[in-house]
Amino acid sequence: MIQERNLPELKSVFKEIMKEPEKMFDYFRIDLKEACENAVSKLIELELTYSLEREKYERTRSESGNHRNGYYERHYTVKNIGDLRIKVARDRKGIFQSKLLKKYDRYEKAIEKDLAIMFLSGMSTRNISLVSKTLIGRSISATEVSKANKELLSGIDRWRLRPLNDLAIKYMMIDGVFFDMRQNKEISKVPMLVVLGVTEDNKKVFLTIQQGDKDSATTWREIFKDLKSRGIDKEKIQLGIMDGLSGLEKVFTEEFPKAKIQRCQVHVARNVLCKVPEKQKEKVADYLRDIFYAAGRDKAIEHFNRFVKQYEQELPSAVKCLTNTIDRCLTFYSFPKEEWISLRTTNLIERVNKEFKRRTKPMEILAGEASAYRLLSFIALKMELNWRKAPLGRNNLPCLDKFTQNT
């Protein structure tokens, strides 16, 4: 250690440091590492003393008593210090087991948490393994990373499936997003279904993230039944906001009989514009904006009737598409005006799906259903914490330009 060196040695160390000043802290880390190794080794030796109930070299009357039997060396990784080589004292009978360093532990709990956070933040177990030597001072295999994740991930699982009795949910936003996932040694696109809730005090929360067929009415029914079994009061649900997935509206109204349906205006507008020639898309999009952003429902119906009169002969398919959904597109007018901006579309849940995609992009392929639940739930939990600063009605303005995108 530097402080224990004599003057000539210190001068030598000083000259080495002055050649490369940026390595100054490397010397300190070496000192700190050696100090930790010695301290832990001595603590384990003291632990053995208490176990044997006598000091070193102290004689006992019983010849059959246990004795010290030297030590063995093991590696143990400590956050911000690196890989330590610990001298673990042992007894002749092999009874003694240190409680300070458990037998199969290879690194402290703080590193386990860091590994789990890196994984949940989007790094694959392989990538974490590649950078582990630089980050913590020892190479950790992908298998070790997975094992280290278990404790934190179990907490994430409990959050995803938590009881919902204490949430007074009034609105639901419903959608699904596809991910490339490894299943039975094959890669396939798997939908993850997402339901967001809005509480009576306008807080936005995640209600479920569940793998399933987004076009299956049976799947959605099971999801809604599960939500009710976890504590959602069906009598308090006033509105479901969705994009017209097959069979979803019917199942939703059956499971939540007092709720109304709001169709996402962006999705409806895209469906309408798909049936419009390219040269007329911009003009038709202007009509749709007039309808969907009118000052009130009566005014919206007035714009709609004008649209029908203008295009029922020229664009009958587009007119029929809008006519079939117009009532459900204007449901939001029945709710408080300050919430209209958030209830017109599924923009909020679309942004959730976009964030899911962004955060999982480095992984390319999700390792399976359980891995997907844990990773997406971690992202969801972080998003939900950020939403506390932005209750329903803020920062949820639909993008009007989306009407003419992807058509």
Image (cartoon, rainbow, N blue to C red):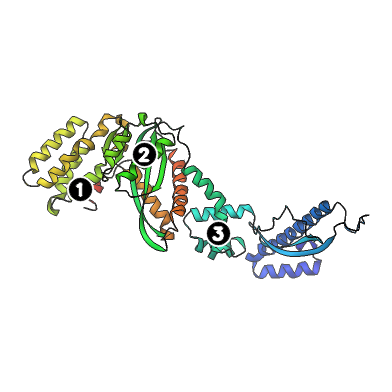
Query: Which residue is located at x 53 percent, y 61 percent?
Result: 128
Q: 341 left or right of 181?
A: left
Judge the density around disc 2: few (<14), some (14-19), many (≥20) Cα neighbours within 10 Å. Answer: some
User: Who comes first in sequence, dot 3 or dot 2?
Assistant: 3
The alpha-carbon separation of the residues under discs 2 and 1 comes to 27 Å
Query: Quick one: which residue is furthest to the left in this view?
Result: 313
User: Who comes first in sequence, dot 1 or dot 3?
Assistant: 3
User: Residue 154 shows which numbered tag?
Assistant: none
Q: Quadrant of residue 238?
A: top left
Name the residue tied to disc 3. 145
The spot of residue 140 in percent (x, y) is: 58, 63
The alpha-carbon separation of the residues under discs 1 and 3 comes to 46 Å
The spot of residue 298 in percent (x, y) is: 18, 30
Name the residue tied to disc 2. 224
Q: 11 left or right of 201?
A: right
Hey, what amino acid is under mark 3?
Answer: Val
The alpha-carbon separation of the residues under discs 3 and 2 comes to 35 Å
Element at label 1: helix
